[in-house]
Amino acid sequence: MFRTVESQLLHQAVTTELKAEFQQYDFERLRTFCVLVLGVGIVLWFLFDLVVSFEGGQGFTFKSIALLAVLVVLAACVPLVRKAWHFYVLNLVYVTLYCVSARLVIAGIPLDLQPLWLTLTASSVVFFASVLPHNNYSFFSAQALTWGLLNPFVGGIPVLELKGTLILFYVLIFASITSYTYVRLRQGKLHNYLMAKLLMEQAYMDALTQIPNRRAFMTRTASRLEASTVDQMRYLAMVDIDYFKKVNDSYGHDIGDEVLQRVAGNIRAVLGDFEFARLGGEEFGVYLWDITPDEVQRRMQLLLATVREAPAAHPVTISIGLGRLDAGDSLNQALIKADQALYDSKHNGRNRCTYAP
């Protein structure tokens, strides 16, 4: 079964909207990790600056303090960022400032050591960038900025000499490995996200009608009940297709499936702004909140008319049981009320909505 789902996923086109959804999810999940990585980078830069400043005789200048303060502010802004692409921009600013400040510090060490420290610092920045949430544009932009600002060959080291050749070889190998690792890890995380999303949809969506199933309805409605206020008007409706067994027996299950899909579409069209689901068989549930008694009655009558008057080769009607949730009522109590009202609708002519006393 897992292989079947995985095969279905691999043949599924990943839309731009789905990628954006994944990127937002990935950033929100790793937000604290992002702060940690940026913080570790600042600590390393601070320690390196201290060593160079005092061992090299430069002194810890006001410029160092100002740059350090700006880096800390950028890292502190990450918990406030809500959009993933905002973080991408912030990270590029951070990388740019980090590389510029690191180059200023490295300029204070002996000239023959600068290419080595530029290479090591650039490698550290690229590695940190590779473990952060990115899209392709932001990651490769960060890598290009890093190697551009911390280019170890700017000081005039000959590429064809042994030292220059070794550094160039290291830069190419490291850049290739980090790029490949980033791309593969990102593909793996995207694959896992899509797999989890697909399995979640299959677990919480009714396969036939493509609306939420009973599990989803109970979970979402219970959550809304917890979040509702005492003065909020809340209702639960049970919807049942009249004489559905006769439809199946007379015309076959294929026609029965079409009827279920049509009624589910009618419910979505009339009550799509509330919680609704197929509870099982020919029975549907709807939870309505923050709605007046007159409006809920109008919606129920509209749903009855929409199903009854829908142009179809095999028309059907529905019966509705409607119950109001009093303060302190649980979801199970509401279901009992609505189910009793539905029973009354069924035994009083059908094609009607009965309000639970």
Image: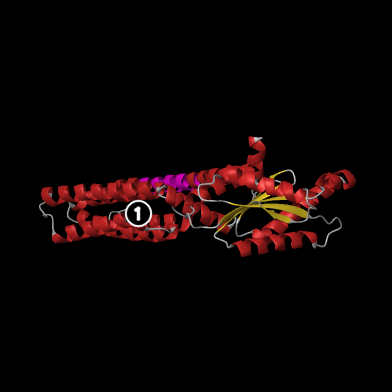
Q: Between 314 and 201, which is closer to the camera in this rendering?
A: 314
* The N terminus - image quarter: top right
Q: Can residue 154 be seen in this view?
A: no
Q: In which quarter of the image is residue 288?
A: bottom right
**Does 180 appear in magenta?**
yes
Q: Between 7 and 136, which is closer to the camera in this rendering?
A: 7
Q: In which quarter of the image is residue 316?
A: bottom right
Which residue type carries mark 1?
Pro
Q: Can residue 275 be seen in this view?
A: yes
Q: Between 145 and 114, which is closer to the camera in this rendering?
A: 145
Is residue 198 toward the left or the right of residue 76 in the image? right
Is residue 318 toward the left or the right of residue 271 in the image? right
Residue 198 on image: x %, y %: 61, 45
Residue 175 on image: x %, y %: 41, 49
Is residue 148 toward the left or the right of residue 183 in the image? left
Residue 205 on image: x %, y %: 64, 46
**Does 176 appear in magenta?**
yes
Q: Between 315 and 202, which is closer to the camera in this rendering?
A: 315
Q: Is the magenta stretch mostly helix, strand or loop?
A: helix
Residue 341 on image: x %, y %: 69, 49
| Residue occupying image coordinates x 11% and y 49% | 54
Residue stretch in magenta: 170-184
| Residue occupying image coordinates x 67% and y 64% | 298
